[in-house]
Image: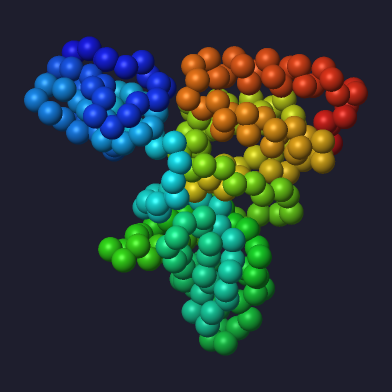
Amino acid sequence: MALCVNEKEIVVPGEVLATGMDNLPASGTFRDGDQIIASRLGIMEVSGRLIRIIPLSGNYLPKRGDTVIARVTDVTLSGWRMDINSPYLAMLSLKDATSRFIKKGSDLTQFFDLGDFVAIKIINVTTQKITDLSMRGPGLKKLPEGRIIYVTPSKVPRIIGKEGSMVSMVKKNLDCRILVGQNGVIWLNGSPKAELLAVETIRKIEREAHINGLTDRVGRFLEERLKQEAPSSVEK
């Protein structure tokens, strides 16, 4: 087996990514004989034996098990409609919102109101792409005030980093709380200067996600930008 392309390189449809039978084709790739070939434009990623292509752009496609950041767009008699940064409808039902008993006809805005942002999990996606959501699970909650930004969903793995290393570095350096939804919606909460610098850093990661050595470059960028700031200017 031999990789024909370096990991994190941009590849085009039809490009041979690997030869031999040791690797397996995943999303965005297919096998032709002993070759794994790209079926779309994107960044090659190797995970164990799997070779996949991360698209450079495109809408978020909901997937069961994803944790996303959603915005309440409607309150109905039986639950809430949510915007998950996707073309498809997403719903949170009463039974998946809380374990509390809710009397029929209760004002549901006491739980989630229009415009609220929540960290929430996708528990089902129907064949018609209707998405069912749940608030039951660790870390799922209504988010307090903060800054919301949107990034290309395919860049989320690079923003998070391996085992959360990239986003942890940003949070630690800036003393800023950050939650990254797998749908490309990010919530930040810190001092105004910390939030602005966090946004600047995330945009840099998004732009340069396909370039090797990203973690070191982001570390140097943060170090230089913090030196330019007055002492304690990004502290709470």
Name of the residue lying farthest toward the bottom? 105
State left or right for residue 77 relative to residue 49: right
Task: Where is residue 48? Give x, y as percent.
Answer: 30, 23
| Snapshot colouring | rainbow
- Front residue of 225/64: it is 225
Task: Where is residue 80? Give x, y as percent.
Answer: 53, 71
Quarter occupied by residue 9: top left
Residue appearing at x 87%, y 29% in the figure = 233
Quarter occupied by residue 53: top left
Task: Where is residue 145? Give x, y as percent.
Answer: 74, 54
State left or right for residue 10 relative to residue 23: right
Name of the residue lying farthest toward the right? 230
Number of numbered discs? 0
Quadrant housing the C terminus: top right
Quadrant housing the N terminus: top left
- Compared with 68, 80 (above or below) is below
State left or right for residue 182 relative to residue 186: left
Res 120 seen here: no
Name of the residue lying farthest toward the top? 2
Residue appearing at x 55%, y 26% in the figure = 208
- Front residue of 140/186: it is 186
State left or right for residue 17 relative to residue 195: left
Residue appearing at x 74%, y 17% in the figure = 223
- Compared with 52, 217 (above or below) is above
Residue appearing at x 35%, y 62% in the figure = 129
Task: Where is residue 41? Give x, y as percent.
Answer: 35, 34
Res 82 seen here: yes
Quarter occupied by residue 32: top left
- Compared with 106, 160 (above or below) is above
